[in-house]
Image (cartoon, helix red, strand yellow):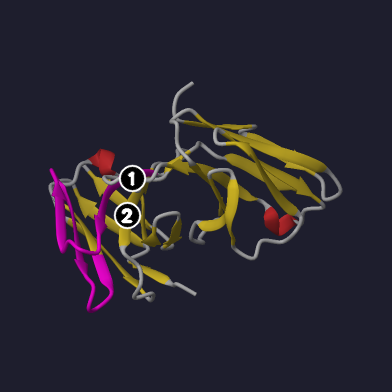
Amino acid sequence: GENVEQHPSTLSVQEGDSAVIKCTYSDSASNYFPWYKQELGKRPQLIIDIRSNVGEKKDQRIAVTLNKTAKHFSLHITETQPEDSAVYFCASGGFQKLVFGTGTRLLVSP
Amino acid sequence: ETGVTQTPRHLVMGMTNKKSLKCEQHLGHNAMYWYKQSAKKPLELMFVYSLEERVENNSVPSRFSPECPNSSHLFLHLHTLQPEDSALYLCASSQRTSGSWEQYFGPGTRLTVT
């Protein structure tokens, strides 16, 4: 079945630095790649997503890049702030079927 | 209530008990999901209902039994669970549109099996 690997498992940065989280997937048929943020004790919430027909997407301080040939995609957060501290999950698949990565705990220190 | 709601938020049950988790979505979506979230493991998709029909069952043990009586409600019936079933159970919903495939999650039910 589909497998999604996510790295690193934890990431500590100083406020203002950039953070990058990387995921690889195995199913070449996957065509949808969302990223979710889950704060402690709260529900996962979508922060950005990308379809397979697009190589990059940006929304203010966050961006996602997709390399379909290499089967990997990455989340980039610039000018990090303490409120960015959370667990971030990547996922791959299609509509109604997603396989999630194991999550990255991001800690942004003031 | 808006979004996706789940009840109860916390549940402790013995291995011989029978209980049900409830999910309700107020977004007008036509698909609903159950996920299991365990510590240090990825979110695991358990069941998918689309237009009230089950379209996905990821080899989930029969002690978990889903029910979708209408497009707004989803239940997960639990019986003779094992301690390893202790986890956060998340419900989600989505609506296939040309613009978004986003799944909206509920707050989850924290289940402890003793």
What percent of the width, then of the height, locates residue A24? 32, 72
Name the residue at 69% across, 55% down. B85
Identify the residue at the far right of this view.
B16
Residue drawn 66% across the image and 61% down it: B60
> Could you tell whether A16 is left or right of B97 in the image?
left
User: How many neighbours does mark 2 have within 10 angstroms: few (below 14), some (14-19), or many (20 or more)?
Assistant: many
Q: Badge 1 local density, few (<14 within 10 Å), some, or many (20+)? A: some
> How far apart in space, not on screen, are marks 1 and 2 (Cα)?
7 Å
Q: Say which amino acid is labelled 2.
A: Pro
**Along the viewing direction, whichever of A30 and B50 lies nearer the viewer:** B50
Q: Are circles 1 and 2 on residues that touch, CB within 8 Å?
A: yes
The amino acid on which the numbered mark 1 sits, given as a three-letter code, is: Leu
Q: Which mark is residue A46?
A: 1
Badge 2 sits on which subunit? A
Magenta part mainly helix, strand or loop? strand
Q: Is residue B102 left or right of residue B40?
A: left
Identify the image quadrant of residue B56.
bottom right
Q: Does mark 2 fall on the same chain as mark 1?
A: yes
Magenta span of residues: A45-73
Q: How many marks?
A: 2
Residue A55: where, in percent of width, then height?
A: 16, 64
- Viewer can see residue A81: yes
Residue B102: percent from left, percent from top: 36, 46
**Residue ID at (16%, 54%):** A57
Q: In the rendered image, which residue does mark 2 sit on?
A: A34
Q: Name the residue nearer the viewer: B19 or B85.
A: B19
Work out whether B32 lies above or below A31.
Answer: above
Counting residues from the N terminus, which is met first, the one under dot 1 or under dot 2? 2
Residue B114 shows up from this direction: no
For residue A80, the mark is none
